[in-house]
Image (spheres, grey):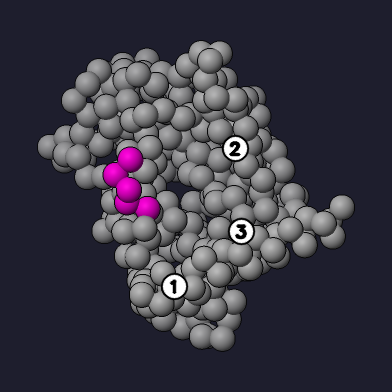
Amino acid sequence: MPLVTVIIIFFNAERFLEEAINSVFDQTYHNWELLLVDDGSSDGSTAVALELAHRHPGRVRYLEHPTHANRGMSATRNLGIRNAHGKYLSFLDADDVWLPEKLSKQTALLERHPQAGMTYGRALIWSSWTDETSPRDHMLPLGVPAEILISPPNLLPQLLRNKVQSPMTSNAMFRRALLERIGGFEEAFKGMYEDQVFFSKVELHTAVYVSGSCLVKYRQHATSCSALSARAGSFRSERWPFLQWLSCYLDSMQVPVDTAVHRALRRELWPYRHPRINVLISPIVEIIERARAFVANREAR
């Protein structure tokens, strides 16, 4: 039973933090350590984390940046990675909840598939935590067959084109050696595409085991990072720096330009590089894509 380091980063998360922590203590897998990494909170979540670390010395540790600074999610996750002792790392966002077999199932998968540096699965899009009048919970389709090992970088082109469910930090598990080798998260990115930058690095460097299990409840609420970014209308504006970064990263990794990754990237960059032409042809492209989807669904029947 290898040690798993669980990293919960939090910033003013008093409302949900204890529920996230309880879902770690409820795991059927018991060989874990918990790092509570404070990104400069000013509410009661700091006291919650400090009290828990005091009650469970050696198993739960509290970390923060110098002067209790707010450094952002990527820098805070990297602080956790640098202090991790486990063979495997698993992140849990402070507003999400794990199901009890999350660590046991994913540890077993990585032990069974030593060539995989990461595994992830399905996630419950969790709206019903508020009351019964909320929208129904649902799961997004994976977009690839379940229980499959995908060699690098074959997952990344599909993610770039939004053909498969993107991994989430809360529903994945990693080998610590891999994250140390690729340098963890890119701290220059703050906002919506922090995770996408990180997962792009992972998927370029290692095979990924995709599981069909649903092991996390991904909480929907108005103050989540994704909800705030959506209200700000920043999807398109934040995607452009991500695509530019990925282009430079592929060049630095000397990925051949004739690969599927580069072809997918060029397709995603095209509307940004040719905005006027894109406005004219995008309705035609949408009709073609709908026709292709209709034919594919008909053939699947």
Q: Residue furthest left?
A: 67
Asked if residue 280 can be seen in this view, the reply is: yes
Query: Residue shown at 77%/62% (left/top)?
Result: 295
Q: Quadrant of residue 180?
A: bottom left
At mark 2, the secondary structure is strand
Query: What is the C-alpha distance between the residues marked 2 and 1?
Result: 37 Å
Task: Indicate which disc residue 12 carries.
Answer: none
Q: Earlier in the sequence, mark 2 or mark 3?
A: 2
How many other residues sit within 10 Å of disc 3, few (<14), some (14-19) or many (≥20)? some
Query: Residue shown at 49%/51% (left/top)?
Result: 176
Percent x, y of residue 73 = 32, 44
Q: Is residue 233 magenta?
A: yes
The range drawn in magenta is 231-235
Q: Earlier in the sequence, mark 3 or mark 1?
A: 3
Q: Quadrant of residue 12?
A: top left
| Residue where numbered disc 3 is placed | 163
Query: What is the C-alpha distance between the residues marked 2 and 3?
Result: 16 Å
Percent x, y of residue 211 = 69, 46
| Residue where numbered disc 1 is placed | 280
Q: Amino acid at mark 1?
A: Leu
Q: Nearer the viewer, mark 2 or mark 1?
A: 1
Q: Earlier in the sequence, mark 2 or mark 1?
A: 2
Nearer to us in this view, 194 or 28: 194
Task: Indicate which disc residue 123 carries.
Answer: 2
Query: What is the C-alpha distance between the residues marked 3 and 1?
Result: 24 Å
Q: Is residue 210 left or right of residue 190?
A: right
Tell me the quarter of the image containing the N terminus.
top right
